[in-house]
Amino acid sequence: MAAARLGAVEAFSRRLFQALFVNRESPLDDAVCLRITSEIGLDPKIFAAALDDPETAAALAATVAEALAAGVFGVPSFVAGGRVYFGNDRLPILRHMLLKAGRPEVDRD
């Protein structure tokens, strides 16, 4: 949510997923998050302030409530076309579904 509020959700998410699923690093490790923040060009102090902002907490609570209402039960999960896609291994299926639905913006690395 902090990265989204700073306009860097895609870059942060991609690097966070790489850290978690490729490098097997914990997203709960402050050093990992600070490294990712620096790698994508965000000021770590501004990012930390966004993390501590009550608006970030409120946005996170709203997103979690929306996800639970949609049937999300773990990370990573994606909701598209009324279906929940759970797990990193489901990303190719989700990508195929989005491309079939005419969403060419997903056709990138």
Image (cartoon, grey):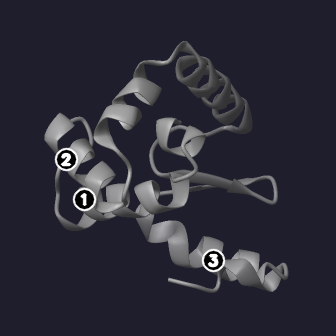
Badge number at residue 95: 3
Earlier residue among tags 3 and 2: 2
Tell me, yes or no, whether the two marked residues, 1 and 2, touch with CB atoms within 8 Å. Answer: yes
Where's residue 43, x and y in %? 34, 44
**Marks 1 and 2, the one that precedes in the sequence:** 1
Foreground pick, 83 / 62: 62
Q: Secondary structure at mark 2?
A: helix
The residue where tag 2 is placed is 32
State the separation of the CA atoms marked 1 and 3.
21 Å
Which mark sits nearer the N-terminus, 1 or 3? 1
- At horizontal 31% and vertical 33% (from top left) the residue drawn is 45
* Residue 3, label in figure: none
- Residue 95: image quadrant is bottom right
Measure the C-alpha gap from mark 1 to mark 2. 8 Å
What amino acid is at disc 3? Arg
Q: Is residue 25 above or below residue 47?
A: below
**Dot 3: within a 10 Å radius of its alpha carbon, few (fewer than 14), some, or many (20 or more) residues?**
some
The percent coordinates of residue 100 (x first, y second) are 79, 84
**Tag 1 near tag 3, CB within 8 Å:** no
Please name the residue shown 47% across and 51% down the image.
76
Q: Measuring from the top left, give residue 108's x and y in whole percent.
A: 57, 85
Would you call the spot at circle 1 few (<14 residues within 10 Å), some (14-19), or many (20 or more)? Answer: some
Which residue is rendered at x = 45% and y = 46% of the image? 75
Q: Position of residue 55 (x, y in %)?
A: 60, 19
Query: Considering depth in this image, is 61 or 11 the residue closer to the camera?
Result: 11
Q: Amino acid at mark 2?
A: Val
The crowding category of the residue bearing disc 2, from other C-alpha atoms within 10 Å (few below 14, some 14 to 19, many at least 20), is some
Quick one: 16 or 88, which is closer to the camera? 16
Position above or below: 96 against 79 = below
Residue type at mark 1 is Ala
Q: Which residue is mark 1?
A: 19
